[in-house]
Image: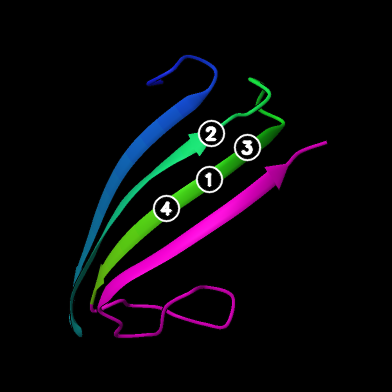
Amino acid sequence: MAIPRVLQPYVGYSRINGEYGDASDLSVGFNWFPMQRRELRLSVQGLYLKDSPLGYSSVPFAVGGNGWAFTTDLVLAF
């Protein structure tokens, strides 16, 4: 963690090579734990898509999508 128990940055990459084309995505974001516990966190993410292989109503991108999608989540686990 960048700041132990408080701030966790992350970067991720994936690629799919297939019969119907090649797709990839890059995610960059961070998790912030305001109470310094895992039960409550704020997650902020930027996701760059190239020829997205999936998309549906509960995700912020469409099939074949290209470009940036940004999400913010507040998670409370109990």
Asked which secondary structure carries label 3, the reply is: strand
- Structural distance between the alpha carbons of marks 4 and 3: 13 Å
Q: Assess disc 4: are there few (<14), some (14-19) or many (≥20) residues with their C-alpha within 10 Å of its C-alpha.
A: some
The type of residue carrying mark 1 is Ser
- Structural distance between the alpha carbons of marks 4 and 2: 11 Å
Disc sitting over residue 41 in the figure: 3
Q: Which residue is mark 1?
A: 43
The type of residue carrying mark 4 is Gln
The residue closer to the viewer here, 30 or 49, is 30
The span shown in magenta is 51-78
- Structural distance between the alpha carbons of marks 2 and 3: 5 Å
- Structural distance between the alpha carbons of marks 1 and 4: 7 Å
The type of residue carrying mark 2 is Trp
Q: Based on the displayed image, in which of its 4 quarters is residue 64 positioned? A: bottom left
Q: Which residue is mark 2?
A: 32
Q: Assess disc 1: are there few (<14), some (14-19) or many (≥20) residues with their C-alpha within 10 Å of its C-alpha.
A: some
The answer to the question of whether label 1 and label 4 lie on touching residues, with beta carbons closer than 8 A, is: yes
The answer to the question of whether label 2 and label 3 lie on touching residues, with beta carbons closer than 8 A, is: yes
Tell me which residue sits at (35%, 37%) in the image: 10
Asked which secondary structure carries label 4, the reply is: strand
The answer to the question of whether label 1 and label 2 lie on touching residues, with beta carbons closer than 8 A, is: yes
Q: Which residue is mark 4?
A: 45
